[in-house]
Image (cartoon, grey):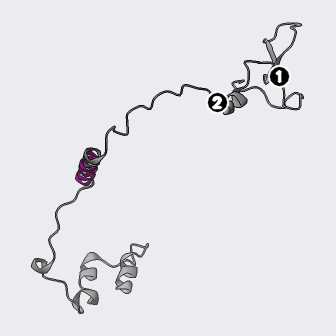
Amino acid sequence: ALDLLDRMLTLDPSKRISAKDALDAEYFRTKPLPCDPKCLPKYESSHEFQTKKKRQKQRLNEEIAKRQNLPYPPPHVRLPPIQQVGPVFQEHWGETNHSTSRYQRTPSTGPSNSYSNPVTEAGLPSRYPPRGYN
């Protein structure tokens, strides 16, 4: 079988085996001989598009069945709003003090934008331009 494949897949067309010679190869005359088509199993036709639709329909049916078996309320119902802000929220967001802004305002001495270069956490000017700067 490998010899036949090698001869059929030869790149040089002048050295490649012809279709007629390939069909006359010993591979097709040795046991096991080809099966009678009537003995082969029959499979339902399966195209990718139809298979996808069948899977989608099956998933939809499974989801509907799951929802019917779930206790009330369904999982997509909104939870009640949180009434109280906890200390974690306050620590994270702090007061409405904006003095720790990434950009420090500088007095204008000429035509420039209203914000200077971004400042790092150490208070030094950043090496990189601000976001959105092109």
Type of amino acid at the residue the image marks with label 2: Gly
For this rendering, which residue is in front, 104 or 32? 104
Q: Badge 2 local density, few (<14 within 10 Å), some, or many (20+)? A: few
Q: Position of residue 32 (x, y in %)?
A: 23, 90
Please say if 55 is above or below 81: below
Residue shown at 37% from the left, 36% from the top: 76
Find out whether residue 52 is within the magenta segment.
yes
Residue shown at 74% from the left, 21% from the top: 95
Q: What is the spatial separation of the Cα atoms under label 2 and label 1, in whole angstroms?
A: 35 Å
Name the quadrant containing residue 10: bottom left
Q: Which residues are magenta?
A: 50-64
Residue shown at 84% from the left, 30% from the top: 120
Task: Kindly state the secondary structure of the residue where label 1 is placed.
Answer: strand
Tell me the quadrant of the picture where the C terminus can be found.
Answer: top right
Which residue appears farthest toward the bottom when viewing the image? 31
* Residue on which the image places disc 1: 117
* Residue on which the image places disc 2: 86
